[in-house]
Every structure is written in structure tokens, then in C-alpha cells.
Image (tube, helix red, strand yellow):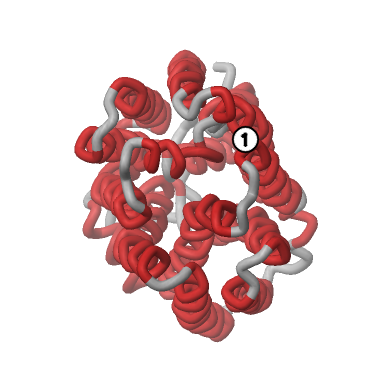
Amino acid sequence: MQIRNNIIKMHLLKGVTWFMVAMPIIVLFFQEHGLTITQVMVLQSIYSLSVAFFEIPSGYIADLFGRKRTIVFSTIFTFIGYLIFSFYGEFHSFAIAQILVGIGGSLMSGSDSALIYDTLIEKEEEGVYTKIEGRNYAIGNFSEATAGILGGFLAVSSIYLPIYIQTCILFLSIPIALTLVEPTIHRKDSISRPFNTISDIIKFTFLINKKLKWLIIYSSAMGVATLSMAWFAQPFFKQIDMPLAYYGVLWAGLNFSAGITSYNAHRLLTSNNYKYLSYNSLIIIISFISLGMTVSLYGLLFIFIIYLSRGFITPALRNAININTTSEKRATVLSIRSFVIRISFAAIAPLLGYIGENYSLTASFYLLGITVGIFSLLSAYKISRLD
């Protein structure tokens, strides 16, 4: 079996699926069809709820029936979702598309990291997981950054053109996924009772392994912070009167920033303790509060800082979660992580959109700083007590 080629194929798949020429202008695309900022955030809430609803079952399916099959179906659902974006133009159609893309995202989430980790176990190289995951995440960010430059310039010609091209690109992910090789499931510890139900794994995650529980809660806080920033970036650009042609360039810069720290995450993790969690929380809190105080060109600095943090913390947390679980339930646990992130974002996104539209972006940034700060600092403290 060409198991060694899995890593290369996953890097290629990440590059293709994250080549999102539509992302720099997606909010403007929705507004072009008459949607308000609140409706845009409701769409993102629908997407997150879709991911959350299918998240844990998808991870469980990946553990039972294979990571490869789950990833293949992920690429198909995402492609169909963008077909709907391409040919329809009202809120309800967009909601259906978001549901399909959400299912695609849930099927990919957890399955990709689990396939990479189990492939490395089979190669007896699991010690380099943070490096490989960081590199994979960096490839995604670099791909999205490059696509962002292209998408911004395409939008100057037509706000619809990036969506059409995005759909064609996503089609290419399907044959790549079909070439993956399913790794052997490894068990690193003996267990007296098999984890053969979702409820068993949920119990293990939140009641038995307390460090895993707080790592997931911390991941949720960071997920809310970074997802919110991704969706508020374009309204922020618009509020400071940034020319449309620069949207793609800025989007590229943000993702290149995340890619750089992601690529070097294994170097930044100088020890096996979790002190970096508290430092990262403080960086995020200060950035959001400062961003609320500086809705101007200078505010771009704090958006870049948030993206730099995002690049580092994502592979670092995935590695920590992988270390604290085992292969036969790895995809499910990673899916539980994503479920908590998405359900948290779905709960707060409409409120953030309403506040941003009816009051100010400043108020939304302050709320994010306070909310993310409370949950992330509490989680970091609990984890440090268990370390």
C-alpha cells in the first residue's frame, strides 16, 4: 500500500479545498443579493449548526467505516453546496447550500487529522505530528492567501466570478480524496471495555479525561475568536473604506501570517507543558479590546495578531488532543472538539451580527474579548492544574 503517499495527498487536498477565491468577497457576494449583516451571520450560524449536528456522528462514522470514505463524501457535499451558490441567489437557497457545505465540513473535520496521525503511527513517526499538522495547516493558509489575491481582483470584474471558479476548484478535490489509502487502526493502550458507542466516547471526553475536556473548551473559545474575526474582517475593511481591490491582498496577508506561525508551531512549542495557553489567551483578549478601540487603519495590526495566534494555536491544540486520546476513538474526539466550537459560534454569531449592525463593530469586538477571555483563561488554569 502506498501509505507513505497519504501525507502528500492530504497536503494536496488541503491546498485544493482551501484555495478559496470566494472568501475575500463572500460577505459582499451575500450583500449583492440583498442580505443584511445580520442575515449573513445567521447564514454562518446555520453553517455552524450544520457542522455541529453532523460533527460527532461523522467522526464516529470515520472511526467505524474509515477516514478515506468520510473524506470522499466530504468533498462531494462541499462541491454540491457551491453549485447551489453558483446558480441560486436568495437567502433560503444560500441556507440549503450552507447546510450542505456544513455537512461536508463536518465529514472532513477530525477525519483528516485522524488519517494523518494514524498514517504516522503506521510509519512509526507519530512524534512529528505537530510538525506535519502544522505544515498541513500552513499549506491551507498559504493556499487561501494566494486564492485571496486572485479572488479580490476577480471580484473587481464581477462579484460572481470568484464563486463560479471556486465551484470548479472544489470539484478537483473529489479525485484527490479517492486516491487516499486507509491506514490501520492502532491502539496504544489496552482497554477493558471497548468504545463502541458515541455515548462511551462522549463520557470519556468530558467525564473521565478531564484534561481533554478543558482542552476542548479552550479550543472552543479560540474557535469562536478566530471564526468571528474571519467574518468580521470584511465589514471592518468596509468600515475603514478599504478599496475592494485590496480585499484579496489583505486576506492573503492574514492567511500568510497564520501559515507562517502554523508552519513553525513545532518550533514554538519549546516544552511539553501548557503555559502557552495562558499567554495565547492574553494576546487574543488584548487584540480584541484594542481592535474595539481602534476601528481604523491601525486596527489591521490587531487583526494580523489574531491570525498569527490562530496559526500557532490550531496545530498545537490538535496535537495536545491527539496525545490525550487513542486511535480507535481519535476521529470522534476530534469531531467532538469541532462540535463544541461550532455550536458555540452558532450561539453567539447572530448576537454579534446584530450588535455590529445596530450598534457598532466596536461593541462586538469588546464582547468577543470578554467572552473569549473568560472561557480561555479558565480552561488554561484548569489544564495547568491537571498538568
| Front residue of this view, candidates 274 and 171 | 171
Quarter holding the C terminus is: bottom right
Quarter holding the N terminus is: top right
Figure quadrant of residue 201: bottom left
Whether residue 117 is visible here, answered yes or no, is: yes
Task: Give the percent coordinates (x, y) of residue 79.
Answer: 38, 23
Q: Amino acid at mark 1?
A: Gly
Figure quadrant of residue 199: bottom left
Whether residue 125 is visible here, answered yes or no, is: no
Task: Give the percent coordinates (x, y) of residue 147.
Answer: 62, 30
Above or below residue 160? Residue 362 is: below
| Front residue of this view, candidates 11 and 206 | 11
Give the SS element for disc 1.
helix
| Front residue of this view, candidates 245 and 27 | 245
The residue drawn where x is 43% and y is 49% is: 330
Task: Give the percent coordinates (x, y) of residue 165.
Answer: 50, 19
The residue drawn where x is 33% and y is 51% is: 36
The residue drawn where x is 32% and y is 45% is: 35
Q: Is residue 322 left or right of residue 102?
A: right
Residue identified by numbered label 1? 148
The residue drawn where x is 49% and y is 68% is: 361
Figure quadrant of residue 108: top left
Q: Is residue 145 left or right of residue 264?
A: left
- How many labels were placed on the picture? 1
What crowding class fits label 1: few (fewer than 14 Cα within 10 Å), some (14-19), or many (20 or more)?
many
Above or below residue 72? Residue 33 is: below
Task: Give the percent coordinates (x, y) of residue 189.
Answer: 46, 55
